[in-house]
Amino acid sequence: MQSDVPGHKQDFPSRRGVMDRSVMEGQGYYNQHSRPQSGIVEFALPALRRAAESCPLDEDARDVVIADLGCSQGRNSIEPIAQAIEILRARSSSKRPISVVHSDLPSNDFNSLIQLIEQDGSSYQRRFEHVFSYFQGRSFYGRLFPDSRVSLAWSSAAVHWFSLLPAPIPDHIWAPRAAPALKAAYASQAAQDWLTFLRHRSQEIRIGGQLLIIAASVDDAGIAGGDGLADQANDVLTSLVADGALDAAEYADMTIAAYSRTLDEYLAPLVKHDPDIRFAVEETAPQLLICPFDAEYEEHGDIKRFAADYAEFFWATYGPSLFTSLRRPRAPEEELELGAELRRRLAAQVATAPDLAACQWRMMLLRLVRNSD
């Protein structure tokens, strides 16, 4: 999609808005620093159980397919998938095969995901028999399954990421801080991505199948919930430019390639009777989620721990989207050290102004059911 906003267009064929090239630490780093996302999962579990109770289970020899769309390293997937399997098992034979397909970008740390599923005591593989895991390194903005193959699809904290960034934000990294013209371009791209996502899932999910989405939203004032932390991170990046660690052109391209939709934006393609979108809305639920770091800080009172928690979370969640714009040739260890320096400086910023960093995330839950053709 072409944008009328000045600037260039970066092609990000991905869930997170990052290319296959990655400067992120592996070995389960995201799993270790994604506790805010765990709160999203906990909020959504009752709706997921209702979806598992409602999805079709024909008495035939086919396996039941569960799709985990945007799995990352798996820490926030294994419990939801286990709960869905528990309900499906209660509804059918204990020997009925269930296939779980975890999908994310080719650059995702699938090794950590596989180790978690195979070794973690809470994994569904440890709890149930006749369950088979598969892993797919592709963007969910393309087709992932044959027609009518999926009974239940789950996606947590994923669909707010762009497939393509229209243009970077001048002097900032956070979409809510963009000027009106650029916000309009972002809204247009986000609408196209959401439409594409729903059209593909309409083909892949069988009639009566369930799709559960939890993703970023905004309130009536356009507040997403992490705005103060994004401001602090932006200040850190400009300080890295001032010190010569980042090139000005690299910083100019840095943008967190995500867009937080309103409820109306989520519902728009679902109520327009698009023949390629075959979903009915079963339920919607906005939710304000307080970051767990804040409640923990009230208990332990350790400002350094609080600041480090937020800095590590920021890097794990947004680092790939930002650092895909690095232009200057650097050795891998130099890139990782640059990320470590960003975390050190961000932690210092948070420690100085903890109230600014505190996040209250606006999230939206949608449970959709696949209509008849």
Image (cartoon, rainbow, N blue to C red):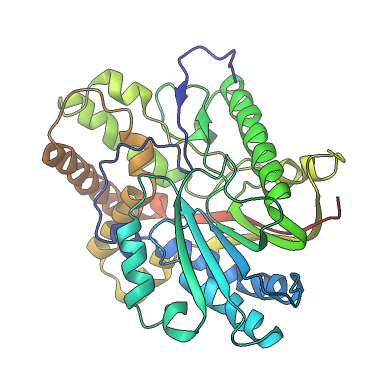
Residue 162 visible in the picture: yes
In which image quadrant can residue 312 be found?
Answer: bottom left
Q: Name the foreground residue: 10 vs 219.
A: 10
- Is 88 located above or below residue 197 in the figure? below
Total numbered circles: 0
Q: Is residue 100 rendered to the left or right of residue 118?
A: right
- Which residue is at a point 21% across and 31% down the rendered structure image? 240
- Which residue is at a point 64% across and 43% down the rendered structure image? 197
Q: Is residue 324 rendered to the left or right of residue 348?
A: right
In which image quadrant can residue 81 be found?
Answer: bottom right
Q: Is residue 309 rendered to the left or right of residue 219?
A: left
- Is 101 located above or below residue 139 in the figure? below
- Which residue is at a point 47% across and 48% down the rendered structure image? 226
Residue 169 visible in the picture: no
Q: Position of residue 133 (x, y in %)?
A: 46, 67
Q: Name the foreground residue: 308 vs 70.
A: 70
Q: Where is residue 182 in the image (x, y as percent from the top left)?
A: 56, 22
- Which residue is at a point 58% across and 78% down the rendered structure image? 85
Q: Where is residue 222 in the image (x, y as percent from the top left)?
A: 62, 40
Q: Name the foreground residue: 325 vs 180.
A: 325
Q: Where is residue 11 in the image (x, y as percent from the top left)?
A: 46, 26
Q: Is residue 36 rendered to the left or right of residue 223?
A: left
Q: Name the foreground residue: 77 vs 297.
A: 77
In which image quadrant can residue 370 be found?
Answer: bottom right
From the image, which quarter does the N terminus lie in? top right
